[in-house]
Image (cartoon, rainbow, N blue to C red):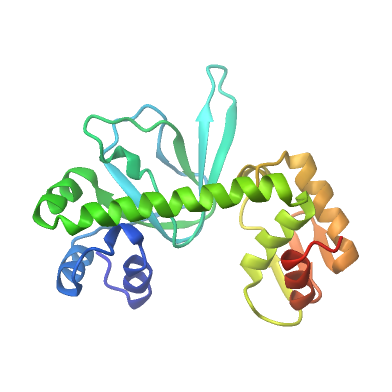
Amino acid sequence: MASDSHDLEMLRSALFLSGLSESDFKKFAAETPIITLSAGEILFHQGDVATAFYFVLDGWAALFREGSDGERTAIHLIGPGESFAEAVLAREAHYPVSAEAATDLRLARIDTARFRALILQSPELSLSIIAAVFGKLRRLVARIEQDQEWSPQRRVAAFLHKICGDNDGICRFELPVEQRYIAARLSMTPATLSRALSELAAIGVEAKRRRIVVSDVSRLARFVNQDEF
């Protein structure tokens, strides 16, 4: 159950729950199971009957498609504060992709049948779902515009800046997942991602495998805000 203050704060930020009153939200959160997966564990497989959708509390989830030859194609990377698989609210839906814990992962699991019943009790939730869908659509449009207008270096820099946050000075961290998943999120090939990371050395970004050192976060932010490469 979501009872930890961090979990409650994260879950309350979910657009698909914005139509719930505070009392209804607390009841919903108390009845919502939190599941934990270790890196590499599968959450669901492509084609499985869809019984739930998910909200990421901590960690990263990777979505991928499985070919007949067993090859995986990375589709997307989902991080903290993001939800996925809401489309399975439709009856008798199946998951169109597989989902794996790309890192150690904590998720709120929202049962689809229960959520549909909740919508009937609280029609405002229907508007919340519409708002959530439009929010994702706006982000998708913004991402398409970035893909078309931003250089690979700038897109990678924006991803790194999101991890560093608004802190000034030096930022050190390890990339949370394999580069192929980050490349999928940024709509580029792993080779392009690797090359962009190398080229960001010109603005003080050092990349050694998954270890990243940003010498000046404010300089990185300036590069993201206006492409000066």
Horizontal arrangement in the rendering, residue 179 relative to residue 123 (left or right) = right
Q: Residue at x 22, y 52 (%)?
A: 126
208 vs 152: above or below? below
2 vs 75: above or below? below
Image location of residue 213, percent across then percent down: 78, 68
Horizontal arrangement in the rendering, residue 1 relative to residue 57 (left or right) = left
Image location of residue 122, percent across then percent down: 13, 58
Image location of residue 147, percent across then percent down: 68, 46
Q: Quadrant of the C terminus?
A: bottom right
Residue at the far right: name it: 202
Viewer-side residue, 64 vs 88? 88
Q: How many marks?
A: 0
Q: Residue at x 72, y 55 (%)?
A: 156
Image location of residue 5, percent across then percent down: 33, 77
Residue at the far top: name it: 68
Q: Residue at x 20, y 65 (%)?
A: 20
